[in-house]
Amino acid sequence: MLDKVTRQEGLRELPELTLESDSRDYLARAARQAQAYDKYELIVDIDGHLHEGRFWGELLDYCENEVLRRDGKWLLKDGQNLPLVNVAMGMIFQAMQGRVSHQTGPREGVEDPAKHGHPFVQIVRRSIDSMGIDYQIVFPTAMLLLGLNPMPDIEIELSYAYCRWLTERILPDDKRILALGYLPFHSPEDCEKIVRKYADNPQITGFTICAARHAPVHDNMYMRLYRLLEEIGKPLAFHAGPNWDDPSFKTLNRFVSMHALTFPHYNMIHLTNWVINALPERFPKLKVIWVESGLAWVPYLMQRLDHEVLLRQNEAPGLKRRPSEYMREMYYTSQPLERFDLDLLKSTMTAINAETQLLYASDWPHWDFDTPGSITTLPFLSDQAKRNILGLNAARLFNLPVKRVRPRTEDVIAKRLQELGG
Amino acid sequence: MTDVVVGKVSEFGDPGRKVVDVRGKEIGIFQLDKTFYAYHNSCPHMDGPVCQGIVLPLTTEDVDPETCKGLGRGFSKKHTNIVCPWHGMEFDIRTGEHPTDAQFRLRKIPVRVEKDLVYVTV
Ligand code: FES
């Protein structure tokens, strides 16, 4: 028997999601998913991105070089979106031409910054509350390709400016937002200066090198930097990125092909140099993280390097163990998790010791972001493995307290419904 | 089972769409060529709000049957898709199926029109 109801009763219309949508509405279904892991003690997102484009003028104010500061501000006024940044403006296809609008956003409004914090902070808070995340490590999206900038002074200037903007304007407004110090790998001396400057900042949980670059990570000029990082005990992350300008990739005629290959490509090159030159033997206490290239490439590289190195030991004489054994002690972030073949994913997770070495990353608000549900819904992981990947491994690596600081999911959902008048 | 009125036919464009939350159940209702279709607002990929994305024709790529040369991409005149706003998966509004792998499909909900009112059964 049908129970007829009218549309006035209990019916709420949901809008199309656009560039202007509020992160909480975009992620409303993620908040529902979060109910399933609400009991977990700690959820840490290793890699969140909020586009700094909206705040680029603020960031440029921190450029110490007066010429670059003036150039950047002038170009901004002249209508350039991200002055000084080497991104080919006509070739930004990440948002799938309107299909995935959060990629280019968010353009949502915020509340009074004097009461609620910097707009950047407010928007991050909305997304991490919705996804049920305690801490998020934010990464400078606009600076992903600076390692390929033909003007090295720009990378150096912007790295100082970014670190200052973050630590002076953003991080003080919310202890749940963490960051990695940006290292201008063009200049080892400046990298060292930045590491020293932020070594004691508890919200700078480590340091990052943008991997899309043509630099030999094993070069002797970097050894002092690695020693310093090892001494201060904070990890070093290699953050992958896309690059269509590399000659090999120029034959790829679709963004999807370039995106699929370039992210793991740069991490594979740096990891190969890292292992073959026995850097894990030289810096046994330095923790290294490979970020945003998914996981499928790792077992491939383990097998490939083991095979070659066991035959050609004379070219990698510093190694005391197989390459895969060193790789199994490194850390990897989960996103974008290749999960369309669960058997392969399960083998991959076994190969990398996911239970202790894998760190959940959302990559929100990018088009290939993953909610924590990408981990909790994996049928082959134990409950403890899920807890580790979602937060406990990160707590160990970054020295974070295992103490819930996120609001209860139920409250997040109820509050938003109330705001929407539902 | 409950029959719910989600609006008058005249409130829908053609192609048109409305997404509603009925006591916690989210449903997308689409009108295409005077026919209505309804699906759960849950993407088979990662449970994203699939019905709240943009509506677009299917992208196609024709190949010359004799020379096998690609003729470039175009938009289909026959197939219209709903695009999931979380990661971009597309589903044919008429069948609910992903164009490449039909194992990814939207979950259907019964929908009918009676005296200019659109009903879904939840
Ligand atoms: S959740 Fe819909 S495409 Fe991923």
Image: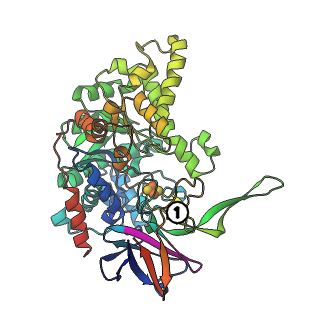
**Residue A59 or residue B24, whichever sits in front:** B24
In the rendered picture of this protein, how many numbered marks are placed on residues?
1
Tell me what residue is drawn at x 23 percent, y 49 percent.
Answer: A134
Q: Is residue A321 visible?
A: yes
Q: Secondary structure at mark 1?
A: loop
Q: Residue at x 45, y 32 (%)?
A: A348
Which residue extends farthest bottom? B115
Magenta region, main secondary structure: strand
Q: Give how far across and how far down residue A420 sits, in percent.
A: 27, 73
Label 1 neighbour load within 10 Å: few <14, some 14-19, many 20+:
few
Give above or below for A106 relative to A312: below
Q: Position of residue A397 (x, y in %)?
A: 26, 33
Q: Is residue A214 visible?
A: no
Q: Position of residue A308 (x, y in %)?
A: 54, 18
Where's the C terminus of chain B, which quadrant? bottom left
Q: Dot 1 corresponds to which residue?
A: A97
Q: Look at the image and give the residue range highlighted in magenta.
A: B26-37
**Between A102 and A344, the one nearer to me in the picture:** A344
Task: Give coordinates of residue B29: x percent, y percent.
Answer: 46, 73
The quadrant holding residue A413 is bottom left
Q: Which residue extends farthest right? A: B66
As displayed, is residue A168 above or below residue A379?
below
On screen, residue A252 versus residue A359, left or right, reads right
Establish whether ligand 1 lies closer than 8 Å to the Cβ of label 1: no
Lateral position of residue A172 relative to residue A91, left or right: left
**Amino acid type, label 1:** Gln
- The stretch drawn in magenta includes residue B33: yes
The foreground one among A261 and A386 is A386
The colour scheme used to paint the residues is rainbow
Which quadrant of the render holds ligand 1?
bottom left
Residue B47, magenta (yes or no): no
Q: Is residue A347 above or below residue A318?
A: below
